[in-house]
Each structure stands twice: as structure tokens, then as C-alpha cells.
Image (spheres, rainbow, N blue to C red):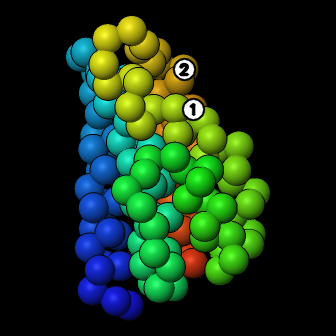
Amino acid sequence: MKPITLEWVAKAEGDFAMLERESRARKNPNYDGICFHAQQCAEKYIKARLCEAGIEFKKIHDLVSLLDKVRGVEPMWETFRQHLAYLSGFAVSFRYPGESADKTMALDARKRCRLFRRAAREALGLKP
């Protein structure tokens, strides 16, 4: 695996660890944070796969646009389009006043992230 791919995977796993830890918080869980890190984890795994395939990409957070770029090497990821579109919404707006996630949204984002993470890790030859 290319060194840059490994870096993206490490960053993705950092976001996954954050969302998992925050999901277990009993006092004042940060639902916005869970959703944001779920989006970030998915984004970084897509970018890892793009790097591994030698496909260039711009600095964007739109998971659907990134999915369109990676589909040529990962056509089965199309099944995640709705999940990725949902997670994309947490990239920016939920980090600022005006929108807030609730527990249901956070659990949904976590579930969708987990599903995509498993597929992304398998595609990269990593243990789920």
C-alpha cells in the first residue's frame, strides 16, 4: 500500500475512534461531533482509495462527488450512495450555529459510517 494511502487510513481511523468514543459518552455526548467524524471517516477512506488507485481529487467534502470519482475502481460502492449523501450533510453545517444533530441522527450516522468503513477497509485489503 502506498504511504499516502496509509496516512489517509490512519486519519480515517482517528475519526472513527473519535466517533466511537463519543458514542459511548454517558454525560453530554456531542451528537454533532459524532456525525462530523462519521462524515470525515468516510471521506478519508474514499480519498485513501483514490490515492491507492492514483486518481487525483480536489479538496472537497462532498462524499457523492468523491464517490463519482472512485466508482471506476470500486463500482460496488454505488450501493452506499444514499449513506454517503446522508453523511455529506455533516461536513460543514453542523459544525456551526443553526443546525444540531440529535441522538437519532448520531446513531444513524454511526451506523452508516460503520457499513461504509467495513467495505472500504476490505477494498484496501485491511481487516474489517
Give me the residue at 41% from left, 14% from top. Answer: 100
Rendering coords of residue 95 (x, y %): 32, 25
Residue drawn at x 68%, y 70% is 71
Q: Tell me which amino acid carries mark 2.
A: Thr
In this rendering, would 43 be left or right of 19? right
What x and y, as percent, mark residue 56?
46, 75
Asked if the residue at tag 2 contacts the one at tag 1, i.e. Cβ–Cβ closer than 8 Å, the answer is: yes
Q: Is residue 108 visible?
A: yes
Q: Is residue 71 left or right of residue 12?
A: right
Q: Between 88 and 120, which is closer to the camera in this rendering?
A: 88
Tell me the quadrant of the picture where the N terminus can be found.
Answer: bottom left
Provide the residue designation for mark 1: 108
Left or right: 32, with 46 as reference point: left
Name above or below for residue 16 compared with residue 31: below
Which of the numbered marks, if any, corresponds to residue 104?
2
Give residue 107's position: percent from left, percent from top: 51, 30
Mark 2 element type = helix
Outermost residue on the bottom side: it is: 1
Instruction: Count residues near mark 1 (Cα–Cα under 10 Å), then give few for <14, some for 14-19, many for 20+.
Output: some
Query: Can I make out residue 107 in this image?
Result: no
Residue at point 57%, 78% (across, down): 123
